[in-house]
Amino acid sequence: MKLCATVELELGRSPITLTGHPATNVVEVSLFGPGRGESAAIHLGEGRWIVVDSCVDSRTKRVPVLEYLSAIGVDVTTQVRLVVATHAHDDHFAGIARIFEACRSATFVCPAALSTPEFFALTDLDELEHAGLPIRAYSEYRRVFQIIDERIDHGLEAVQYALPQRHLYQDAGQAISCDVLALSPSDKAFRRAMRAIRKAMPRADVPKYIEPIDPNELSIALWVRAGDRLMLLGADMLKGPNGSGWHAVLSGPRPPQRASVFKVSHHGSSTGHRGGVWSELLLRSPIALLTPYRSSGLPKDTDCRRILNLTDAAYITAAGVRRPLEGRTRREAAAMGTLPLNVRELDGPPGQIRARSVVGAAPTDWAIDLGGPGRSLSTYLAELESSR
């Protein structure tokens, strides 16, 4: 047998390298991501957490954000307030049902306008081929909505739908007040999705056809305030078109202050970049955090340079070059047939970028820790350039 495809590493559990629970007056943003997928954990102070999106370690099938929170002593059953699925792309929701199931007192947040995977999860339509919908996407959301129904049956407020300027979580009752505000998806994106879903409903006289809905159009951008620490999480927001994406955010009401931490949208791609986000929503030279999407080659060299021209504090969760397979895996794969010399890891281990700041410190005073393959974006760019 000749082995030509990329071979995925089969290794043991990769240890969480960053430890230590943040103090009650310390705000944290931790971003996790291998070569495909991302998840964030945010400490709002006073032991309150939210989790945004989910990814899975392709080698171990574990959920890095759950491993990390467990390792630092967070009781996810009581301390996680929100689990946010920003949009229905599997590099952002793989494993989200496991997270929501573990976070028993959390509210689930998704876009008010459902996209195709969410729509099918809420219906009895099993003819997924009409939408080209992966079974994994269907089953992931199906399980989430089952959990929501179970919790509602027990009297819990288990789900919220994100709309522009909706406060998803607020707490002014402790020393550090906090607020999680949705900036998107826009009304236009909502209408487009609803129109597509209406067309998807089965009719006896019309063949079923699902109008394509780009889940990125429905991405939830979040404005997060914890005390005086301000963060902007860009999900996979696109720059437009008019009335959607960042264009809609910049055209509508916006928070009165600027954020000092930015989870860069859409893996640093030019399709998710709008200059006004940096000049109007962020402090000058903010902390910029991003994850790669290797199969699409994101971020590109040009993307890295653009971001580094806007901030000298940019970080990414993975290496710029895929590592060669380790010896044992190479030997096992070679025994199956001819193994190309350039075979690399499929996704690689998930890296972590952790930004922490004490409430009351200077707005730009954030300490950065890097776990696993996490590194500065300038190092990532140098690796890309040296590999050619």
Image (cartoon, rainbow, N blue to C red):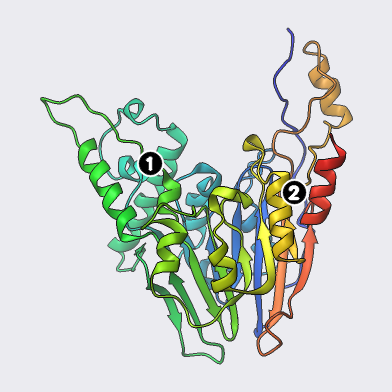
Query: Residue 254 sits in which quadrant?
Result: bottom left
Q: Residue at x 55, y 76 (%)?
A: 48
Tell me, for residue 306, which label it has, or none.
none
385 lies left or right of 97: right
| Image quarter of the C terminus | top right
| Image quarter of the N terminus | top right
Amino acid at dot 1: Pro
Q: Badge 2 is on which residue?
A: 318
Q: Badge 1 is on which residue?
A: 117
Q: Which residue is drawn at 78% across and 30% down?
A: 344
Q: Could you tell me if residue 181 is visible in this image?
A: yes
Query: Is 108 in front, or is 129?
Result: 129
Q: Could you tell me if residue 220 is visible in this image?
A: no
In the displayed image of the protein, which residue is found farthest to the top?
1
**What kind of element bears circle 2?**
loop
270 lies left or right of 179: right
Q: Residue at x 54, y 48 (%)?
A: 271
Query: Residue 6 sits in which quadrant?
Result: top right
